[in-house]
Image (tube, rainbow, N blue to C red):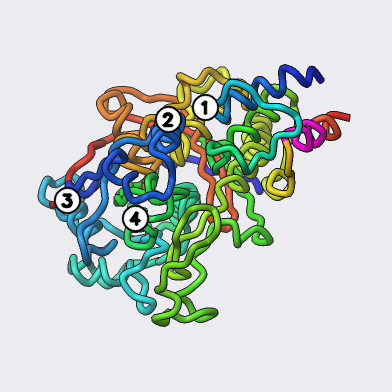
Amino acid sequence: MDKTEFYQRLAEILDVEEVKPENVLKDFDGWDSLAILSVLAMADAKYGVSIKAEEIRSVVTAEDLARLVEAKRK
Amino acid sequence: MNFTFRRKRISGVLVVVPANERSFVTDMKNFNFPQSRSLKLKEVMGFDKRRVVGPGVCVSDLAVFGLEHLLERGWLKRDEIDALIVITQTPDYIIPGTSCIVHGRLGLKRDMLSLSISQACTGFLIGLIQAFALLEQESIKKVVLVNSDVLSRKVSPQDRNIYPLIGDACSITVLERDTEDSVIHANVRVDGSRASALIIPAGGMRQPHTPKTAKLENVGDGNLRAKDHLFMDGAAIFNFVQTEMPPLIESLFAHAGTSMDSVDYFLCHQPNRFMLEKLADKVKIPRAKMPNNMVGHFGNNSGATIPTVMSFNLGERLLREKLHVCLAGFGAGLTWAAMLLNLGKFNFNTIIEYK
C-alpha cells in the first residue's frame, strides 16, 4: 500500500493540505461522522477492505488508521 | 429466504407528501458543527429540501387523505378493498393498529382483512410480499398497501446524524392479480442481533416514556438527542448496506435466473445520495440505473421511499409502458430485501400534497 497516497486521500476527506502520520485524527475539525463514512467508503473502494465503525473509532493517529487498512489487506 | 409469486401485479401507486417544506441550509444553523462541514455534508449526501408534517399530524391522517383522493377519482372503489395493510413504526396509537384506525375513518366494509405491521425502510418490500401472499386467497382480489411514517416527530433537531435527512410521507399501493403470466422473485433477510443500530430506545414497554427520556442529552459526537428520539449509527448502517446488499442482490438474480443487464432500473430505499452511489459501484451497475435524487427533494421518508422514487422519476413512463425493475430496501431490524418484477401500465402513479 502506498502510504503517501493514503495520507493524501485522508487529507482530501478532512479538507486539509496535508496529513502527517503522527497527526491525531480527533484534532482535525473535519473529523466528524461524514469523515468516518468517507474513510469507510475510501477503504472499501480503493483498498478493497471493509472496516467496522467501532474499529475506526478506536484509532488515534493517521498512522494507526493506515496500519488498520494495511492489516486488513493481508 | 427466496420467494416466488405468479400472476400478481401492482396496479397503481399514489404518494402523499406534506406541503410543508424544510431546507437544510436553514436547519444546519441548529447543529453544533462548523457551517463549512455541514455544507460539505449537504454536497456529499445530496441533502437539500425535505417534506415534514405539521404539529400533531399522524400516519392515519396522511393515509385517509390519500385513500379519499383515490376513491373520489374512482381509481379505487370502497367495496373492492379486500385487505388493508398499514406498515408504520410511528403508529397513531399503541393499541389498536393503525390499519383499524384508517378502516374506521374511511368506513370500509367489515368483511375484509386489516393488518398492521411494524417495519420501516424495508417495509415496502415486506408489504409487497405480504400482499402477494394474500392474493393467493380466492376471496382476496384487491389489496391496499399503505407505507407511512411521521419520523420527523421522533428526531432531535440538534442531531446532525439524522435530522437533516428525515422526511414524512405516505405511499398507497394497490395490488391485484395479473392476467399475464408474470413471475416475481424476492429475497428477504434479517439480523436482529444488530437491532440497536437503528432504534428509538424509549416509548415502548422496555423503557416507557418519562420526562427523563424526553430530555436532550449530549451524546458526545457534537449531537444532542433524547431517549425518545430515533438513534442511527450511521457508520454501522453504511457498512451494513455495503456488505449485505450486494450478496443479497446477487442471490436474487441467481434465484430468478436472469442477469442484471436485463433490468431497466434499480429502485432502492433512499437514505442519501452517497450511500446509493457507493452501492451502485459495489454492485457494478451504472449509477444512472439507480436513481438517488429523492433525499434532496422529499427527505428519506422511511417505507415510502421506493414508491416516491418510482413516482418522482418514472411517473409518466410507468403509466404508459412496462419496465423490468429491481426493488431494494434495507433498514431497521436490521432487515434487508430485494425484489425483481415487471412494473408499469399503472392506473395511477402520482404524488399529491397534504395540506
To which chain does the residue with label 1 belong? B
Residue identified by numbered label 2: B292
Residue at 43% of width from left, 45% of height from top? B33
Report if the CB atoms under discs 2 and 1 are less than 8 Å apart: yes
The kind of secondary structure element at disc 2 is loop
> Which label belongs to residue B354?
3
Distance between the alpha carbons at the discs numbered 3 and 4: 13 Å
* A5 vs B134, nearest the viewer: A5
Earlier along the polypeptide chain: callout 2 or callout 1?
1
Residue identified by numbered label 1: B277
Q: Nearer the viewer, mark 1 or mark 3?
A: 1
Distance between the alpha carbons at the discs numbered 2 and 4: 20 Å
Instruction: Work out whether B337 lies above or below B265.
Output: below
Kind of residue sitting beneath label 4: Ser
To which chain does the residue with label 4 belong? B
Labels 3 and 2 share a subunit: yes
Kind of residue sitting beneath label 2: Asn
Distance between the alpha carbons at the discs numbered 1 and 4: 25 Å
Report if the CB atoms under discs 3 and 4 are less than 8 Å apart: no
> Which label belongs to residue B148?
4
